Each structure stands twice: as structure tokens, then as C-alpha cells.
Image (tube, grey):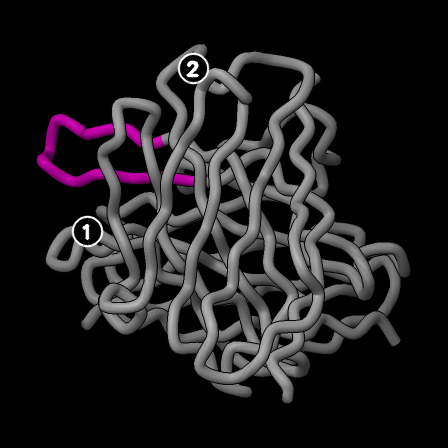
Amino acid sequence: QVQLQESGPGLVKPSQTLSLTCTVSGGSISSGTYYWSWIRQPAGKGLEWIGRIYTSGSTNYNPSLKSRVTISVDTSKNQFSLKLSSVTAADTAVYYCARGRGQQLGSGYYYSYMDVWGKGTTVTVSS
Amino acid sequence: SYELTQPPSVSVSPGQTASITCSGDKLGDKYACWYQRKTGQSPVLVIYQGTKRPSGIPERFSGSNSGNTATLTISGTQAMDEADYYCQAWDSSTAAVVFGGGTKLTVL
């Protein structure tokens, strides 16, 4: 059974770059037609999607974060990573990584969902 | 940008049916999914492709979608179902995943 585990610093200074890694265990990150995603949740607020990557390297990002986000994948290590630059206190949140699937429908619409999530890691932005 | 709207809270008595709605433009065509997030835990997928249940999810969870609304229904609600529920869909115009604001389900 595939499991995901987030890792990285729990405290980041304002204006610096937040870096997190998600390690995939129990299966190969390259198997199947999955994508690998980052999501966050500030305290008391809802879920916010950050972006996703396929093992081909293809990425999609939340338009509101796109200018500051980079997601990359290292298939040799079975990991994918998040970098969020120029962080502020507003970036303080629990960060989750997740596995997703998507499919194009005959109608032209596309649907996606995320079926395996990591436990999440808390990142605080503070000096 | 695409928006999904959920009621902030829904209350239900144990054993009764809870319905949580999610509205968005042409959402019925987008096959929304639903996540359950209990306090201190990571989200769990409970419905995908509009109406399908992942393995391990109790049959009391069901999904429907039509027009501009997707609905998560929990039949015979139990105390363990108390959680925040989020709908999610794909916004083709921005190529991005979009979440609803979340609904806090209280089992009184």
C-alpha cells in the first residue's frame, strides 16, 4: 500500500524559501498514471491546492501561487519536492503531499481526485 | 477563477441523513469528489468521479451531481462522521484543482 511522508524544516524565516520533500513508499512513484500534488491548510481555514507534477515533469500550479512555486520530482529517490519562495506569515500552514489521478471524459471535461495523502507537516513562517 | 461554494456548517442527529451541497458553474459535468478531514488527521477521499466510493469507505456515504450542484449524502449518520468535508473539482480554464471552502458536519 502506497504511503506518503512529508519532511522539511518546521520553521522558515520571512522572505526565505520553504522547501519540503515527499517520500513515496510501498510503490514506485513512476508506476501508473498518477500525479503528485501539494496541498496546504492554514489554521482555521480550508484546503488550498498548491500544484502537481507528473513523473514526466509536467506541472500545473495554483494561479495565485504560481509565481512563487516550483514542484520537482526525483524518480531515483521516489520523491517529489516543493519550493515556495518569498514566504510570509500567510504561508504558515500544514502542508500535505498527495497522490492523484485524473481522466479526460468523452464530453471534453476532465476530472481528478487525490486518493492517498501524507500525514502533513506544519510549517511556521516567523523570524 | 472557478469557485465552489459549500455551506459553512451542517448539523444532523445520529441515525439521520446529512446532505452537504457544493455549487459551481456546470459542476455536474465536472464530476466532483469529496474529502473528509477529522481533527488532527489528514484528508480522506470518500467520493470520487461524482458518485463512486473508494474501497474501505462505508456504504452510508454517497454522492450525486446534477446541473450546478454536487451533493454528499451520509445516511444513518454516526458520531464518527463528525468532521469537515470538502468538495473538489478541476478548473479547466486555469488547469488547476479547486476546493470548496469546507463544511463542518456536527452530529448532535
- At horizontal 51% and vertical 64% (from top left) the residue drawn is A18
For residue A24, what is the image quadrant? top right
Residue B16 vs residue B35, the one in the foreground: B35
Do the residues at discs 1 and 2 belong to one chain?
no
- The amino acid sitting under disc 1 is Ala
Residue B25 — which label? none
Q: Which residues are magenta?
A: A102-113
- The amino acid sitting under disc 2 is Ser
Kindly identify which residue carries mark 2.
A30
Kindly identify which residue carries mark 1.
B95
* Mark 2, other Cα within 10 Å: few <14 / some 14–19 / many ≥20: some
Residue A66 percent location from the top left of the image: 25, 64
Q: Could you tell me which secondary element the residue under label 1 belongs to?
A: loop
* Mark 1, other Cα within 10 Å: few <14 / some 14–19 / many ≥20: some
Residue A58 percent location from the top left of the image: 22, 34
Residue A111 vs residue A77, the one in the foreground: A77
Left or right: A78 in relation to A43:
left
Q: How many marks?
A: 2
Can residue A18 be found in the magenta stretch?
Answer: no
Residue A92 percent location from the top left of the image: 59, 78
- At horizontal 67% and vertical 60% (from top left) the residue drawn is A9
Left or right: A105 in relation to B105:
left
Residue A69 sits above or below residue B54 on the image: below
Q: Quadrant of the N terminus of chain A?
A: top right
For residue A75, what is the image quadrant? top left
Could you tell me which chain the residue with mark 2 belongs to? A
